[in-house]
Image (tube, coloured by chain):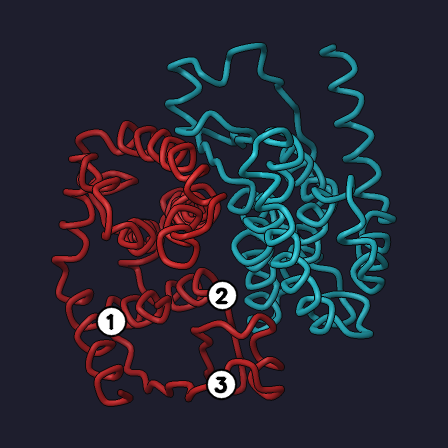
Chain colours: A red, B cyan
Amino acid sequence: MRDLRARWALEEAGLPYQTHLLGQGDQDKEEYRALQPFGQVPILEEDGLVLFESGAIVLYIGERSETLLPKDAGARFRATQWLIAALNSIEPFVMNVALMDIFYANEEWAKLRRPGAVAFVQRRLSALSKSLGDKPYLDGDRFTAGDLMMTTVLRILKHTDIVTSEKRLAAHVERCTSRPAFKRAFDAQTGDFRKAA
Amino acid sequence: MRDLRARWALEEAGLPYQTHLLGQGDQDKEEYRALQPFGQVPILEEDGLVLFESGAIVLYIGERSETLLPKDAGARFRATQWLIAALNSIEPFVMNVALMDIFYANEEWAKLRRPGAVAFVQRRLSALSKSLGDKPYLDGDRFTAGDLMMTTVLRILKHTDIVTSEKRLAAHVERCTSRPAFKRAFDAQTGDFRKAA
């Protein structure tokens, strides 16, 4: 669930927040669709501003956190670049495989297509791994909003060995999810879901 | 080609720029992959800063253009939200259909899958159209970087009637592509490609 991205960013920024979980069917109600046209989570509300799209929410929070978006203009834009790379150059191909596994596993087209879709995402991840190289983070020595977003995207495939077989990417995910802010966000999400269930 | 996004943003911002087209096979060369891990276009270079991802490039240019990113913080983040919605909530599903039509038209899986993929993108576009409503632009009366990006994403399906059958979206694309900056960018792109061919 993409609310983890917003929670993690808020924890990195050290900003207090309150969560409000949608109930069954809320995402298709008129009043939620007026805030989020596609009925997805998360949205962020602050002082009358309502934002959707996890990427935009992380960038919004990032303006108050030098950890997420460094002050130096070049480093800040490279962090934004990696955040968008996660959302536009990696996630679509990751989701393509994940949706086949989750929703379409018994469909004939998915059985025929899956090997090609896996091969495509493997090529993308191999290129990403090469770009990461021996650096700890995508832009070098510092964790940024780009690493946050890429980590949440790579975790989508944790039911497969597609990411774990790329050792440098697997180590990157491990490095990022070892951060105390990730752990707090993850525990808070798990706690909220348990309360709701 | 996604360089149109960068060209259009530069034209809206009134910034001069020079283009450098890749030659055959350049995108797989080591030196280009060092700048763009996935071998795609465009990249932007300025004063030693190299950025890839068309979304990040448009946001970078947008910081020097109130047309693209309004000064008001709320409006600026909503523009960013729509830009990311184009890249993450619309483009993956648009590309899913486009890739089937362009690269996989004769594949059995694509024949089986296309109706479902079209139905999915139609639902997304119907929700987007409802959100646009009778406003001229996604966030209201003003064109922003969000409209720029959404327009370039919707144009990917111009070989089909999927967008044109959503009258409000079709009118939005028409409104945005009627802008002089779009026309200049489009003509410049066409001219560059003609010279290269």
Q: Which residue appears at 27% of the width and 67% of the height?
A: A8
Q: State how far apart marks 2 and 1 are (Cα).
A: 18 Å
Front position in the image: B49 or A52: A52
Q: Chain of mark 3?
A: A
Which of discs 1 and 3 lies nearer the camera? The answer is 3
Q: Secondary structure at mark 2?
A: loop
Q: Amino acid at mark 3?
A: Gly
Q: CB under 8 Å between callouts 1 and 3? A: no
On the image, the x and y values in percent for residue B76 come to 59, 65
Front position in the image: B126 or A114: A114
- Same chain for marks 2 and 1? yes
Q: Residues within 10 Å of mark 1 (few under 14, many from 20)?
A: some
Q: Amino acid at mark 1?
A: Glu
Question: Is B38 displayed left or right of B45 in the figure?
Answer: left
The tag on residue B58 is none
Q: State how far apart marks 2 and 3 are (Cα).
A: 20 Å
Q: CB under 8 Å between callouts 2 and 3? A: no
Say which residue label 3 marks: A25
Q: Chain of mark 2?
A: A
On the image, the x and y values in percent for residue A146 come to 34, 50
Q: Which residue appears at 41% of the width and 50% of the height?
A: A100
The answer to whether A2 is drawn above or below residue B145 in the figure is below
Q: Secondary structure at mark 1?
A: helix
The tag on residue A11 is 1
The tag on residue A53 is 2
Q: Is residue B66 visible?
A: no
